[in-house]
Amino acid sequence: MEFENILVEVKNRIQYITINREKKLNALNRFTLAELHEALTTALADKAVGGIIITGAGKKAFVAGADIAEFGGQDAAAGKEIAQNAQTTVFDVIANASKPVIAAINGFALGGGLELALACHIRIAADSAKMGLPEVTLGLIPGYGGTQRLTQLVGRGRALEMIMTADMITAADALQFGLVNHVTFPDDLLPKADEIMEKMLTRAPLALSAAIKAINAAFTDGVNGYETEIEQFAGCFSTADFTEGVSAFLEKRKPEFKGE
């Protein structure tokens, strides 16, 4: 499929998705969100893809927010539809993906852009990146999961401060807060993302999926995370990858996992 707002490339079992609206600082309009949904669901269904790396075109921005021009003149019902549609079709798809998703934050990650990164399983930032949720300066709050996922990562106090002041933070601050996993020089950003993803792709794919489900359960209301962990742990025993992993361990060789 041809995309207008994103670039998609698959290499060495990694699907690279680049938000490609550089002149608009890669802002997320409804067309970009629709294309992201298509690219993500296709990658998750493709057995040739083991993981996904999301980044932004150019050096200035990962994603500098939602396209605010689309919000003008909308009422509460429309606002609810905007947030619900984006969360359901993109942000929750990423957070609950059965394959690892890494955000490579190459520049400004603001508003919906930071929320996109927050939905990813792992975040890596260039040392020049700046992050923030400035929605209250527009009379809004984050609507793509930001109030929830930021709080899970950095805690209630820091989340409240970031959201209510609307201040941006540096990559160094984000690392200290636990918002990002690693900070690199800009030229090392994608290589670092590749390094982490390639390591994960040597592990058992079904076990990676089970780990994501179990960890997400810790933050899901009404779900007992310990019970989910037990169920996912038990399910691994019925996979060919478990048999291969144990055999390889006992035979002192590297396992060859097939995702079965």
Image (tube, grey):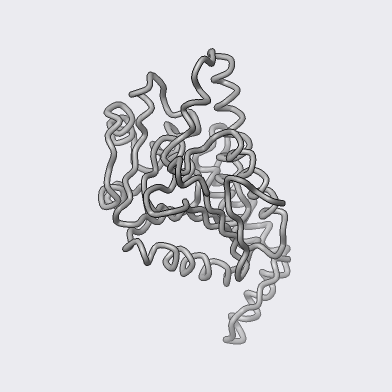
Compared across the picture, whether 135 is left or right of 255 comes to left
Q: Residue furthest front?
A: 23
Quadrant location, the C terminus: bottom right
Q: Which residue is pictured at 60% across the width and 52% down the height?
A: 230
Q: Which residue is pictured at 57% across the width and 25% down the height?
A: 82
Compared across the picture, whether 228 is left or right of 108 comes to right
Compared across the picture, whether 94 is left or right of 23 comes to right
Observer-nearest of 14 and 151 = 14
Residue 152 in percent (x, y) is at 41, 40
Residue 46 in percent (x, y) is at 72, 58
Q: Image height check: is 190 above or below 32?
A: below
Observer-nearest of 105 and 98 = 105
Q: Which residue is pictured at 48% across the width and 26% down the height?
A: 69
Q: Which residue is pictured at 33% across the width and 34% down the height?
A: 159
Residue 119 in percent (x, y) is at 50, 44
Residue 83 in percent (x, y) is at 55, 27
Compared across the picture, whether 146 is left or right of 236 comes to left
